[in-house]
Amino acid sequence: MQQLPPGQSITRKFPVVGEKAPPPEALDLAHWRLELGGQITSPVSLTYDAVMKVAQDEFTADIHCVTSWSQPAMHFTGIRLSDLLAQFAIAPLENAQFVRFEAYSHRLHDTSLPLELAISDSWLVHSFEGKPLTPSRGYPLRIVTPSRYFYKSLKWLRRITFLESDRLGFWERTSGYHNNGDPWREERLDGTRFTSQSETNAFRNLTDFSDWRQRTQEDAPRVLVKANLQHWRPRTPDLTTLQLKACDFRGAELDGVNFSEANLTLGTFTGASLRNAMFESTDLEGADFSGADLTGAHFSNNFLSATTFIRDDRPLLGFDGMTMTAPDGLLEDQRAYLEALEGVFLQLESPY
């Protein structure tokens, strides 16, 4: 039996996580550049052709996503970071302690690793199972660091910077993800970033969530991380676009609530009443709906990688009239469970 890190579910799919598409410049190979700088002997700007002339290797690795899916023995082709540095005679200076990876992405994603780990375990990957990566999975070049949760494996690589001091990455800054991210130690979330009980209590009593929403392109929304929202009955059904990550909704009364475009990743909804709730373009990766009442609930265009509707023989309490269209990343066992339910309308994505 495949050994998995704690809290993970096995799949043979390769779910798309995060942004689905980069900006056009990421795919324009004639103008694409990989910049290397910071605390190194000689900064360099590399064309895609130059990168692809570095010695290629194939490798097989188990991949573990923070949203709880794992795929064993994924087969990639790429370049070891250490080989790239050797090819262009790039050496970290003595004061370099960390490596920062930055992306061609709309939200300027980045992440960091300790220098030793990056040199020993990071690959610049361009192909999966013998075929080029699709843009949604990181084409033309991404980082893969198998020993860490997959948010440390940046898509659409643009820049590698060697740092004297560490800088938290995008998901670590905005979502409270753990900066180390070791799946075997279940380092998903940084406990120092959890929302306090006093802030949670104030949130539970709000009738207007405007201050918790993004107002401009540059303005980041506020995020609740691992908040206790058990038995919550919101004073308004409009919970659209809220960022409520890894929150505990057990026993909450959420009938008719509109969660459209919200982020509810890793949320726990066991025993919650979600009758006629709306989930339109909602990020539900890793959320647990087992034991919830989803009668009449509407799901459309959702991220559903590692989302569970039955767990440990705990089925949905209600599902009649539930609809689900175009689910993205629904894992095999959960799909089979939903397909077997009478009274549920499913319009699934193309076969995987």
Image (cartoon, grey):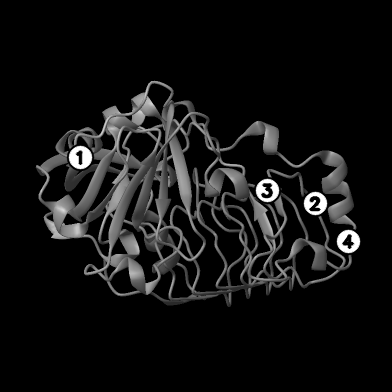
- Quadrant showing the C terminus: bottom left
Query: Distance from label 2 to label 3 (Cα)?
Result: 12 Å
**Disc on the earlier residue, 2 or 3:** 2
State the residue position of label 4: 206
- Quadrant showing the N terminus: top left
**Disc on the earlier residue, 2 or 4:** 4
Which three-letter amino acid code belongs to the residue tagged 4?
A: Leu
The crowding category of the residue bearing disc 4, from other C-alpha atoms within 10 Å (few below 14, some 14 to 19, many at least 20), is: few
Describe the element under mark 1 as helix, strand or loop.
helix
Is the C-beta separation of discs 1 and 4 under 8 Å?
Answer: no
State the residue position of label 3: 247
**Disc on the earlier residue, 3 or 4:** 4
Could you tell me which residue is drawn at 35 percent across and 70 percent down? 25
Which three-letter amino acid code belongs to the residue tagged 3?
A: Cys
Instruction: State which quadrant residue 195 falls in.
Output: top right
Instruction: State which quadrant residue 24 falls in.
Output: bottom left
- Residue 110 or residue 271, whichever sits in front: 110
**Disc on the earlier residue, 1 or 4:** 1
Task: Confirm whether residue 263 shows in the render.
Answer: yes
